[in-house]
Amino acid sequence: MDSIFRRHRKKTILLVNLVALLLLGLTAEGVLRLAGWRPHPAYFEIVETLEVRNDYICDEKGIAKLNPDATFPEGISVNEEGFRDEGFAEQLASDRTRIMFVGDSFTYGLSASPITQCFADRIETYGYTAFNFGIPSAGPRMYAAVVEKYLPIVKPNMLAVMVFLGNDVNWLPEKLQPYVLPFHSTNVGQICAYDKNGNRMTAAEAYEYYYGGFWTRFEYYARKSVLLSLVGHRCIGLRDRLLMSRYRNKSEDVNQYAIDSFREIDAVAREHRIPCRFFIIPTKPGMRHAMNRYKNLKDIFKGLQTISEDFDEGDYSTGRDVHFNNAGHEKMARLVHDTLRQLTTK
């Protein structure tokens, strides 16, 4: 009789604890939502078949460019240098004030609707000629290669380096080789082609390394449900950071390549007497973590001319998309315009 009572008592205690944890979780969820936090879904999809695309080619400097033989959505023009822009020679012939943009998918114009409403296009409504060297999935090393090759040709009135804190200062390797793309363009997006030690991988190997190595298919669909909860989102985010730490190259400072690349860009601009400004693009509100907060990155930008603005959730696209919407692109265009106006009126 006593054993039956003890088993019943243990079950009761367990049930009470589970109910208490559930109530605690619901309370935390309510408090976070009242404070303005919102959950965000996963950033990529698991696919049955990985498709490799031919959207990009690579030049002798290791710079990724749009493949003129590829098919792009309506509204995307590719100039003779392989960038999303109108005729390069025509731009060089213009006598208007010039801006040279260097950056990743934000600068390229992803999520602007239409894409010609991105800040690099909008800035031309102020009377400037904008050279858009935005390359999806590019990072600081590629930015430096673009500046070294094209700054002496463009001779802009201002070099605008658009730094996205979500991935421009992180640990992912960015290895440039002549005529070899540093990433694979696939149906799940661009995937870094190198592992933590700089070894090149096929698209299938990279997909497994960066994605399959983290989550099983069951985990993926389970976490998509959990991510609807803020508490679950936070718990999974902590777990992912612990898993990602296994893939970091412990022998190299996590941000050193970014620091060196930014210094190199600034040095090239100084050599050619071109004002250089680093425009900070913060990560989407609710997705920020300590490494990507500007206030925690002062050492990286020490001695550089940085420009920042407060972007809120209304400036970004919804769902999985981390890019600016049209409001965000317009805000950045105004920021760049104000900065250049101050330079040209001195």
Image (cartoon, rainbow, N blue to C red):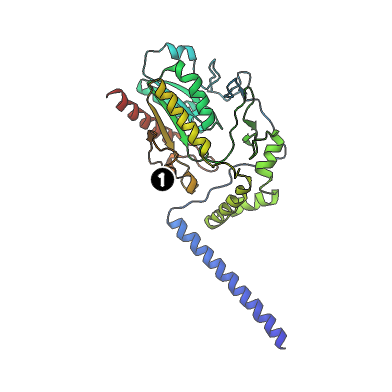
Name the kind of residue labelled 1 in the image.
Lys
Q: Quadrant of residue 5?
A: bottom right
Question: x and y percent of residue 18 in the render?
Answer: 60, 70
Which residue lies at the image location 56% right of the left edge and 32% below the top edge?
A: 137
Residue at the extreme front = 251
Q: Would residue 232 appear left or right of 124 to someone viewing this image?
A: right
Question: x and y percent of residue 111 in the render?
Answer: 51, 33
**Which quadrant would the C terminus be assigned to in this image?**
top left
Q: Is residue 105 above or below residue 179?
A: below
**Which quadrant would the N terminus be assigned to in this image?**
bottom right
Which residue lies at the image location 43% right of the left edge and 26% below the top edge?
A: 267
Which residue lies at the image location 63% right of the left edge and 35% below the top edge?
A: 191
Foreground pick, 73 / 45: 45
Foreground pick, 15 / 165: 165
Residue 192 shows up from this direction: yes
Q: Is residue 62 above or below residue 164?
A: above
Q: Quadrant of residue 206?
A: top right
Foreground pick, 272 / 238: 272
Element type where label 1 sits in the image: helix
Q: Quadrant of residue 272?
A: top left
Q: Which residue is mark 1?
A: 295
